[in-house]
């Protein structure tokens, strides 16, 4: 079971890190750093859409990891 835990942690961690990299580094508009705020009104919609899709993927990965950890902790609590 430990090997499965490590595989799940590495998979979710890698996916989450990849999404963060895409949102905050790869798809960062030139000349802007940090949050977009009102600058998003003047950007190409393609950039905004791609950033949002990667952000959604990141939320799904993070939620999946949290759900997995909750199930594992409940399973360990019931096995005692």
Image (spheres, helix red, strand yellow):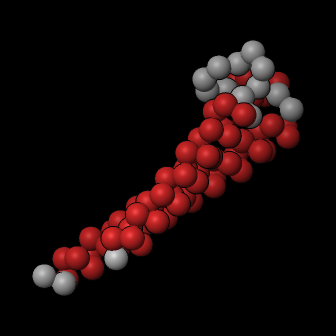
Image quarter in which the N terminus is found: bottom left
Q: How many numbered tags mark residues here? A: 0
40 up-or-down from 15: above or below: above
From the top left corner, tell me how far across and down residue 6 is, in percent.
40, 63
Horizontal arrangement in the rendering, residue 20 relative to residue 48 (left or right): left
Residue 3 or residue 20, whichever sits in front: 3
**8 or 43: which is nearer to us?**
8
Residue sitting at x 19%, y 84%: 79
Determine the residue located farthest toward the top in the rendered image: 31
Above or below 65: residue 79: below
In the rendered view, does 25 fall on the left or right side of 5?
right
Extreme left residue here? 80
- Name the image quarter holding residue 75: bottom left
Q: Position of residue 67 (x, y in %)?
A: 41, 67
Q: Residue at x 76, y 25 (%)?
A: 29
Report whether 27 appears left or right of 64.
right
Q: Is residue 53 above or below residue 78?
A: above
Q: Give how far across and how far down residue 24 sits, in percent.
A: 63, 33
Q: Position of residue 55 (x, y in %)?
A: 63, 47
Quadrant location of residue 73? Answer: bottom left
Residue 59 visible, this orientation: no
């Amino acid at each position: 079971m430990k090997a499965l835990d490590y595989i799940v942690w590495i998979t979710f961690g890698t996916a989450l890190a990849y999404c963060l990299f895409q949102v905050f580094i790869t798809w960062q508009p030139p000349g802007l750093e940090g949050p977009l705020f009102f600058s998003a009104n003047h950007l190409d919609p393609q950039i905004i859409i791609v950033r949002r899709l990667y952000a959604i993927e990141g939320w799904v990965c993070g939620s999946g990891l949290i759900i997995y950890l909750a199930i594992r902790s409940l399973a360990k609590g019931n096995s005692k």
